């Protein structure tokens, strides 16, 4: 029986992205924000204000699970709670300027490491191909 080429391609992409993700996690500062906090702030930075339920759904978490994370982020000044113009009974969360700065600082070490490795290990054509592939990977990550 011949292996399914689509399944083989999916395995290769999954393995490569998981390995790169692990390597990037190793580049994080040991005293940095938790991955859950980074994820919540990243959603807010990319998508704008969101409800706690929408943030939980974006990371496939239970809404109760994000309550403490959001409270910590709000107490640290990384996010702010706002009224929801669409539903006066609900609140939405938005990233603050301090949150954007914390997010940039957290990503800086990983970005610098990756830029250095790409510059030393990849040709210009490979870097260009990787840039194009990143847009495709973003589309896959956003798919339902």
Image (cartoon, helix red, strand yellow):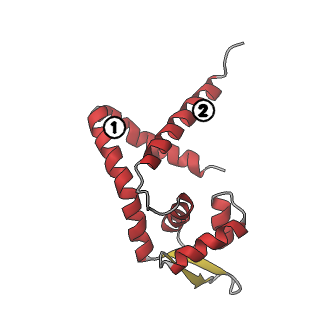
Q: Residue at x 33, y 46 (%)?
A: 113
Local crowd at mark 1 within 10 Å, few (<14), some, or many (≥20)?
some
Is any atom of residue 50 visible in this view? Answer: no
Q: Quadrant of residue 98?
A: bottom left
Crowd class of label 2 (few under 14; some 14 to 19; many from 20; radius 10 Å):
few
Name the spot of residue 117 as percent of width and height, x first: 32, 39
Disc number placed over residue 23 in the picture, else none = none
Question: What residue is shown with label 2?
Answer: 10
Q: In the image, what residue occupies the spot 27% across and 35% down?
A: 120
Q: Which mark is residue 127?
A: 1
Q: Secondary structure at mark 2?
A: helix
Which residue is rendered at x = 58% and y = 52% of the image? 142
Asked if residue 86 lies left or right of residue 29, the reply is right
Give the structural element (helix, strand or loop) at label 1: helix
Q: How many marks?
A: 2
Question: Would you place residue 107 above or below residue 132 in this image?
Answer: below
Q: Can see residue 141?
A: yes
Q: Residue at x 64, y 28 (%)?
A: 7
Q: Nearer the viewer, residue 40 or 106?
A: 106
Q: Nearer the viewer, residue 137 or 15?
A: 15
Q: Where's residue 33, x and y in %?
A: 48, 63
Query: Image check: 112 left or right of 92?
Result: left
Residue 119, image quadrant: top left
Mark-to-mark CA distance, 1 and 2: 21 Å
Where's residue 48, x and y in %? Answer: 52, 70
Instruction: State if disc 2 and disc 1 touch (CB < 8 Å).
Output: no
Q: Image quadrant for the N terminus? A: top right
Comparing 137 with 40, the one in front is 40
């Amino acid at each position: 029986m011949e292996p399914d080429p689509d399944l083989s391609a999916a395995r290769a992409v999954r393995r490569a992205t998981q390995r790169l993700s692990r390597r990037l996690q190793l580049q994080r500062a040991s005293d940095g924000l938790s991955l859950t906090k980074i994820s919540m702030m990243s959603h807010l930075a990319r998508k704008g204000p969101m409800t706690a339920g929408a943030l939980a759904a974006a990371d496939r978490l239970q809404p109760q699970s994000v309550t403490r994370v959001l409270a910590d982020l709000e107490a640290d000044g990384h996010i702010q709670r706002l009224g929801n113009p669409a539903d006066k009974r609900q609140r939405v969360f938005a990233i603050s300027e301090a949150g954007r700065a914390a997010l940039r600082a957290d990503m800086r070490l990983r970005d610098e490491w990756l830029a250095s490795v790409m510059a030393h290990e990849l040709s210009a054509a490979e870097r260009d191909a990787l840039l194009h592939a990143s847009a495709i990977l973003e589309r896959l990550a956003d798919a339902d």
